[in-house]
Amino acid sequence: VYLKLQGLRILQELGEPKAGELFNKAIDAAQADKRPDVQAVGMKFMVESGFAQWRAWGKEERADLINKIVKNISAQEPEASQLALVTTVVDFLVDRNGEANALQLLGKLLPHFKTSDNHQIQQALPLLEGIQRRLGLPGNQIDLTGTMLDGSQLDWESYRGKVVLVDFWATWCGPCRAEVPNVLKVYRDYHDKGFEVLGISLDEQREQAESYIKQEEIPWPTMFSDDPAERGWRHPMALRYGITGIPRAILVDREGKVVHMTARGAILGRELRRLLGEPVARANQSTRGFVQQVSNLTSEN
């Protein structure tokens, strides 16, 4: 069945007449088969075919794919391989601004997986629940708790009334390090206007984070777990919000509500200008220019 579907897909890509029609019929036949292994092959090709056509599809076609995935998985006993497939589909959707579709998928399938006593599924479920929680953050409040790098406890309530960048990062993450100069710049520009940064380090060793922060002269506080078993991707906040890739820069407004999930590069500067106005340095420069203009006019008169 796998080889047949693979061959039909290649013929479709080569433009063979009726190959597309035969390919779709073969996928449907595989999914209708009573053998779980054959059903899994049919599901694989259905999902991959949908991925290939996603950008060209409209809302109805995209929703139809999600419904088919839900229907096929719900009709079977929960398996770890299904959970892995759902995670792959969710990651694909999020990368293509399909958060609404991803939430729909998770909302319908998580209850299905929760009925299972399979050990692998139970171990993987918290991450998937975290992803669902993360996707629901825009427009809502984010709740953070835990230990700081210096051993103290985070006082998240003290950030209320500030615009805060919650930055999941690690020293081994190249894009994270590349973003630091930009965050340092906007921090200097906007800190006096009410902008704060809260780092959440996913490093395994405390010394790694401390050394890098000292080297780059990073002024904002950073969270780091005291428990070695809760470091890296196992950090409680990384699990709570299903962090599967970094940097993950979440911007929170003065009311504590999430306004952007990927506030990096030029996006961060644009969002801060929208929330806090012009940078302090530029605002001071404009004020000095206005005062000088008034002074010149007075002298001329």
Image: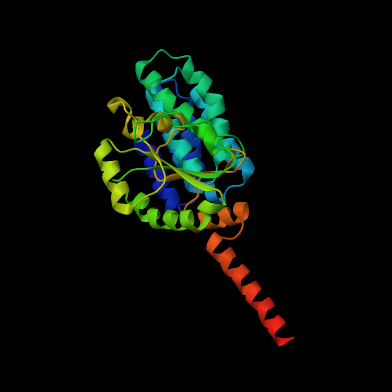
Location of the N terminus (image quadrant): top left
Percent across and percent down for residue 175 are: 36, 52
Residue closer to the observer: 179 or 149: 149
Percent across and percent down for residue 272 are: 56, 53
The answer to whether residue 82 is above or below residue 289 is above
Give the colour scheme shown.
rainbow
The answer to whether any part of residue 260 appears in the image is: no
Residue closer to the observer: 122 or 56: 122
The answer to whether any part of residue 125 appears in the image is: yes
Residue at the extreme bottom: 300
Q: Residue visible at 59% across and 64% down?
A: 283
What count of labels does the image hold?
A: 0
The answer to whether residue 81 is above or below residue 77 is below
Location of the C terminus (image quadrant): bottom right
Percent across and percent down for residue 79 are: 40, 21
The answer to whether residue 184 is above or below residue 255 is below
Using residue 245 as the reference point, say whether residue 24 is left or right of it.
right
Residue closer to the observer: 182 or 155: 155
Q: Residue visible at 45% across and 24% down?
A: 33
Q: Quadrant of residue 256?
A: top right
Q: Residue visible at 36% across and 55% down?
A: 178
Percent across and percent down for residue 202 are: 34, 37
Q: Residue visible at 53% across and 55% down?
A: 190
Residue closer to the observer: 162 or 117: 162
